[in-house]
Image (cartoon, coloured by chain):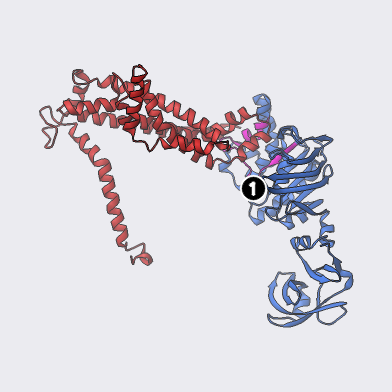
């Protein structure tokens, strides 16, 4: 749109349109979070909407005091435990499946589509189906049983797709070099493949954890008598009418960011350690 | 580089009707080759000629479809790579990115269960050998291409191989470094006394390095011999063209080759003459390269001494008479 030749000084219409679109995207992404963050510091007499009636940390304290409204602590712990379990299982089994799919085997194509097709099944149907099945079998649905399975129907196909991408970028010459230098199959995996893939696997783990941590629909019919955090928050929106809800939102958002931050720090630390070990050795 | 720390003896390698097929595609079509212990062999050819598949079968990274591979006195067809007495240097070096130079070089010792101090000591000795001692603590990503190559060499040599396999070892380097590493490979070969098998698509590299140059085409060996023999007596038109510096012309009952630097321009003293038009001219310093359009040959090259050319210079489009002596023509096998 007439601006290519003066790219440094004048920007074309397309730049402004795309910048505006990006601005809207960021607003929709972080606007609600910012609003909730601000409202969670509502004064003790304030309501669910603006204007702010003073500024306080009243609702945060309230969150930890009263247990009548909801079991915030318990649901939070359950969500974390569930997220960690999903994370470990997702990393282990996507990696194993990734290894298996590196060799073409009879029916590998069909098996892959079967695994990935579950991504397009509406999540609430998966949830309903698993809940029903447990009912029919006379099993008690629990957050650590049926809900764990329901979450894995979501995270495993995703994990598998990511592991495929990771292996696509992995140079098989590393394995050949290891073999050439006398490493057995297990030594090759242990000393060469896993250390090289480690940063990517941490990414898969983080992905699995976050998918599980905020999963709502797949938990709805499968959690049994104890709620996970998203279910608890949803429950609270229907019967809590104070800004304590916002305090909860702020706190869980902060937690999510902390988890992501810790993972990133872990990655940076890993790289640093390798560099430092490299620098101090010899 | 000196080679005091490596005591290994070169092993002979023999390929007997060696064949590699991927499904219905034949990559290596039953080749026979004897590589003497301690020699420098270059497998040479265009991409897809089967040279890399051959090397990988020798290394044990590719299954042998048919035929036999002998290293030393033993058939090695099904042996794992580490038990063949070979070590391979990979095209992209394949240095482990998470290990520093010492740990990369010490890797094979670690797999064998050699104690930590022992393997670090031997690895640093080996790094000294390739002039990389002061980079021992660097990660591969912190090294230049040439430095990575030295580390890869050290990592291969620490296994004390009888045969060193090199897959296009110089192709990733810039031209200046390539010439230097070529010299170092040759020196290393002389000092170690082990067998080198080196895959390349560059005839210059093969000429400069090989005792035995093996020209491959479409999964077969076109010709194997010392570089000088290949250059002076190419067996087929393919070899003559691939080695370069030759003209392939129609002769009595087949094709003949004549070296481009044996062609003279003008009338004097030639047994065979052709008339052509100058299509292209290139100044190469000590020589001038001419391309002529000659009836009956798709490409006719003349290499002239610089001084001789400028005695009677030509320009593009000039008609010239090119001639050579019958002694310089060499019949080719179809």
Q: Measuring 52% from the left and 39% from the top, which residue is drawn there? A: A109
Res B81 quadrant in image:
top right
Provide residue A168's location: percent of width, then percent of height. Answer: 53, 42
* The C terminus of chain A sits in image quarter: top right
In the picture, measured across the screen, residue B164 lies left or right of residue A170, that is right
Q: Measuring 28% from the left and 47% from the top, which residue is drawn there? A: A25
Q: Nearer the viewer, residue A90 or B90?
A: A90
Q: Measuring 63% from the left and 54% from the top, which residue is drawn there? A: B174
Q: Is residue A167 above or below residue B262?
A: above
Q: Which chain is blue?
A: B
Disc 1 crowd rating (10 Å Cα; few below 14, some 14-19, many 20+) is: some
Q: Would you name the residue on which mark 1 appears?
A: B146
In the picture, measured across the screen, residue A13 lies left or right of residue B196, that is left
Res A208 quadrant in image:
top left
The total number of labels drawn is 1
Residue range of the region highlighted in magenta in the rendering: B86-108
Identify the element where label 1 is drawn: helix
Q: Nearer the viewer, residue A47 or A158?
A: A158
Provide residue A137's location: percent of width, then percent of height. Answer: 37, 18
């Amino acid at each position: 749109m007439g601006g290519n030749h003066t790219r440094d000084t004048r920007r074309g219409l397309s730049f402004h349109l795309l910048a505006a679109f990006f601005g809207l995207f960021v607003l929709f992404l972080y606007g609600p979070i910012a609003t909730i963050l601000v409202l969670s510091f509502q004064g003790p007499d304030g309501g669910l909407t603006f204007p702010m009636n003073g500024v306080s940390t009243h609702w945060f304290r309230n969150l930890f005091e009263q247990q009548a409204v909801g079991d915030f602590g318990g649901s939070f712990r359950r969500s974390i435990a569930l997220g960690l379990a999903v994370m470990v299982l997702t990393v282990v089994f996507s990696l194993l499946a990734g290894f298996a799919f590196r060799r073409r085997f009879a029916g590998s194509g069909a098996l892959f589509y079967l695994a990935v097709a579950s991504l397009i099944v509406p999540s609430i149907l998966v949830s309903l189906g698993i809940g029903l099945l447990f009912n029919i079998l006379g099993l008690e649905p629990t957050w650590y049983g049926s809900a764990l399975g329901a979450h894995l129907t979501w995270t495993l196909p995703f994990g598998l797709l990511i592991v495929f991408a990771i292996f696509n970028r992995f140079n098989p010459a590393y394995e050949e070099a290891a073999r050439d230098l006398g490493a057995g199959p297990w030594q090759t995996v242990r000393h060469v493949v896993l250390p090289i893939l480690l940063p990517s696997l941490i990414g898969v783990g983080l992905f699995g954890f976050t998918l599980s941590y905020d999963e709502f629909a797949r938990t709805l019919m499968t959690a049994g008598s104890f709620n996970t955090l998203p279910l608890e928050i949803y429950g609270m929106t229907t019967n809590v009418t104070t800004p304590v809800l916002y305090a909860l939102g702020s706190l869980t958002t902060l937690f999510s960011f902390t988890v992501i931050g810790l993972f990133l720090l872990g990655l940076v630390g890993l790289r640093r350690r390798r560099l430092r070990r490299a620098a101090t050795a010899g | 580089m000196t080679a005091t720390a490596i005591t290994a003896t070169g092993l002979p390698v023999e390929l007997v009707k060696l064949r590699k097929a991927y499904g219905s595609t034949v990559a290596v079509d039953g080749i026979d080759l004897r590589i003497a212990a301690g020699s420098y062999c270059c497998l040479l050819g265009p991409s897809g000629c089967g040279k890399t598949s051959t090397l990988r079968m020798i290394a044990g990274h590719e299954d042998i479809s048919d035929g036999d591979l002998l290293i030393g006195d033993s058939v090695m067809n099904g042996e794992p790579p580490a038990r063949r007495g070979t070590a391979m240097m990979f095209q992209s070096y394949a240095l482990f990115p998470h290990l520093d130079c010492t740990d990369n070089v010490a890797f094979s010792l670690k797999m064998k269960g050699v104690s930590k101090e022992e393997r670090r000591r031997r690895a640093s000795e080996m790094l000294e050998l390739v002039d990389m001692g002061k980079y021992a603590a660097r990660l591969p990503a912190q090294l230049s291409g040439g430095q990575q190559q030295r580390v890869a060499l050290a990592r291969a040599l620490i296994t004390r191989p009888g045969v060193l396999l090199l897959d296009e070892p110089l192709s990733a380097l810039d031209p200046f470094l390539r010439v230097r590493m070529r010299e170092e490979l040759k020196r290393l070969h002389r000092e170690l006394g082990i067998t080198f098998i080196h895959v390349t698509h560059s005839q210059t590299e093969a000429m400069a390095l090989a005792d035995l140059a093996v020209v491959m085409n479409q999964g077969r060996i076109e010709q194997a011999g010392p570089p000088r023999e290949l250059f002076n007596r190419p067996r087929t038109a393919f070899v003559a063209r691939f080695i370069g510096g030759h003209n392939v012309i129609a002769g009595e009952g087949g094709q003949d080759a004549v070296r481009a630097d044996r062609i003279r321009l003008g009338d004097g003293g030639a047994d065979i003459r052709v008339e052509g038009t100058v299509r292209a001219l290139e100044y190469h310093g000590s020589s001038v390269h001419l391309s002529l359009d000659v009836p009956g040959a798709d490409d006719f090259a003349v290499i002239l001494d610089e001084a001789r050319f400028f005695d009677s210079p030509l320009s593009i489009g000039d008609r010239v008479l090119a001639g050579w002596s019958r002694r310089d023509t060499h019949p080719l096998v179809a």
